Amino acid sequence: MFDHIERFYRPTTLREALLLLRKVGKHGRVVAGATDIVTQADRSSRFLIDINHLGLSYIRGNNRGCLIGATTTMAGIELSPVTIAFAGGILAKAASTCGSIQNRNMATVGGNLANASPAADTAVVLLALDAQVRVANSRRSRKIALTEFYSGPHRTVLNGELLREIIIPALPGGGRLGWSFQKLGRTETDISLVNAAAGLQIDARGRIKWARIALGAVGPTPLRARIAEDLLLGNTFNEDLLARAGEAVMREVSPIGDGRASAEYRREMSGVLARRALRECATQAGCKL
Amino acid sequence: MSDFHLDFIVNGEIKHWTIAPGDLLLDVLRREGYFGVKRGCETGECGACTVLVNGKPINSCLMFAAQAEGCEILTIEGVAEGEKLDPLQEAFLEYGAVQCGYCTPGMILSAKALLAEHPDPTEAQVREALGGNFCRCTGYLKPVEAIMAAARVYRQVGPSGARPKAERRSALLGKKR
């Protein structure tokens, strides 16, 4: 099992955790919910640093956006009145699909991002919400846009740093907004074969003023479908536009095939999920179809 | 390797155990004789190893035992009061909800957490609560019926003790870090 672990640290302040992280260097592993660490084959770590006691379990929301501590559990996000009310509740909805209740009582949102699974359910929602992450080492703290956070499958740009907070900026002002999270899995709480999140802002003349489409499990990292987003801007929502956006999404993704689904199926489903998500957004924003 | 000195509460009893820093909660509990905590998939899928940590169901196969420091654990061994079975246990027997029995401890603990939160659950809530507990004998109909029946008993006899009081924990353990 984890016979190589020499020491389990339980720091109680962020400062203490960051100093430990520096001390143990590449031999250390940060533990939040532990669910990914225990199920992964990597047993090389010698030191575990439990970050659950740093005061990083919180959700704070106001009209300027939302701040979520890294060790907030999926269950916490799923049940928080703040996340349920924010952006159509898509983050709460995504969190509620991240495994069984047992998993969701352990797994954290910071872990879901830092683990960097291409299929991470909260990642697509946070991409659609233009989220940033605040990361720190013992010397400095910096903010990274989530679009810049991933460097490959299960790889991030974190360099001896701790992901401490997720920053969701204020939602676009003016006009009407619509939001959607879509997931395709074998069961409701299974790992996603494909997932998608979208947001639309419709102006007073019925034109799309702002659009976000993010997809997971269809590329090396969770990704934004920027060509499809641009194609929507300035247009009135209709079936033809929806079809063209779906086509654009299918061209932008680069899925692989594995034991769960073929690359072709994932590509096809990326179009289906993007269309479903955009349709739900448009309906919420009051568009007539 | 430096040992980890784990102070926590299992089924209402204070425990001071010396464990390896990388030990998983499942392994530690079974080593100490809590065989009602079943070893199943060991990847957090099947729920056979479910225990309640501070009232919430978790997969003990995915949790480092050291993470449970200062917590209150409930395993199936702590659900009955002496010889007197919990209404959930009675209902599982009465409704024939136990076949091979391997999934039963996890199911009862998941149900206990549900009923502490929702004393009058809908059938959909019961099914959702059992989503992380696999039964490979036949199915879920009888456990669902049993839980609905136990909920009725719970509502008559008052709230269950599944949700421990934080004050009680800190009183028992002192303010240890």
Image: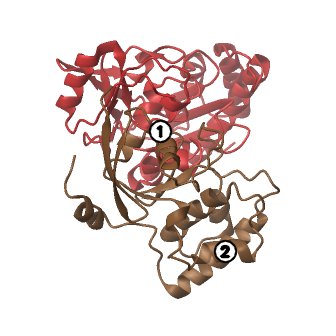
Chain colours: A red, B brown
Q: Are marks 2 and 1 in contact (CB under 8 Å)?
A: no
SS state under label 1: loop
Q: Is residue A266 left or right of residue A167?
A: right
Q: Is residue B10 left or right of residue B154?
A: left
Numbered badge on residue B24:
1
Given residues A27 and A241, the one toward you in this image is A27
Q: Mark 2 packing: few (<14 Cα in 10 Å), some, or many (20+)?
A: many
User: Would you name the residue on which mark 2 appears?
Assistant: B148
> Where the C terminus of chain A falls, by quadrant?
top right
Q: In the figure, A285 relative to B89: above or below? A: above
Going from the N terminus, do you reach mark 2 or mark 1 first? 1
Given residues A32 and B42, the one toward you in this image is B42
Looking at numbered disc 1 in the image, what kind of residue is underneath it? Leu
Q: In the figure, B152 relative to A9: above or below? A: below
Identify which residue is drawn at 69% across, 26% down: A270
Disc 2 versus disc 1: nearer the observer:
1
Query: To which quarter of the image does residue A18 belong?
Result: top left
Given residues B102 and A118, the one toward you in this image is B102
Identify which residue is drawn at 23% across, 24% down: A20
Where's residue B110, x and y in %?
57, 60
Q: Is residue B21 left or right of residue A151?
A: left
Where's residue B121, x and y in %?
60, 71
Query: To which quarter of the image does residue B8 belong?
Result: bottom left
SS state under label 2: helix
Q: Is residue B140 left or right of residue B10?
A: right
